[in-house]
Amino acid sequence: MDLGAFSISLPVSDLARSREFYESLGFTVVGGDADDGYLMLSQGRTLVGIFCFEGMDFDAPMLTFNPGWTNDRTESAAFTDVREVSRRVRAAGITPERDCDPGGSGPDHVVLLDPDGHRILVDQFVDAP
């Protein structure tokens, strides 16, 4: 199963202050939109997402995977669609905290909890191959 690019997603209280902090560590903004409450920052192949979403239940750092995207920030020609990821984790006895539309296509996401309650977001924002 190819989960795609890996990043850590961090909830922040002040997006501009956090951006400035990570830029001082050598990160550069490579995606996202401050007006929408999130930015993606990169340093080499390391990706960090910072977000300040109101009303979302993401209140702790979480592991994030993006099927169809590489850590070099390019689209992948072949990848495991998020609906297939959902099917496989369910077959393994894991019930997603938030599941995707199994009959859908294109962008969607699944949220899993590991045995210790850490969130794992599988967030596909590209169309399936």
Image (cartoon, rainbow, N blue to C red):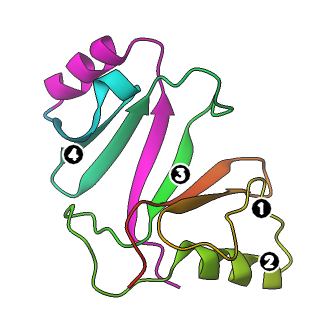
Q: Are the residues tagged 4 and 1 within 8 Å (C-beta)?
A: no
From the viewer's perspective, is the residue at label 3 or at label 2 nearer?
2
For the point 46% across and 81% down, which residue is it?
2
Give the mark nearest the N terminus, 3 or 1: 3
Give the mark nearest the N terminus, 3 or 2: 3
* Mark 1–mark 2 distance (CA, rounded to whole Å): 8 Å
Q: Are the residues tagged 4 and 3 within 8 Å (C-beta)?
A: no
Q: Which residues are magenta?
A: 1-25
Query: What amino acid is at disc 2?
Result: Arg
**Residue 63, which numbered label?**
3
Residue marked by disc 2: 90
Give the mark nearest the N terminus, 2 or 4: 4
Q: Is residue 54 above or below residue 5?
A: above
- The picture places residue 13, in percent across and down from the top left corner, at 48, 13
Residue marked by disc 1: 96
The answer to which quarter of the image holds residue 51 is top left
* Mark 2–mark 4 distance (CA, rounded to whole Å): 32 Å
Query: What amino acid is at disc 1?
Result: Pro
Q: Is residue 27 magenta?
A: no
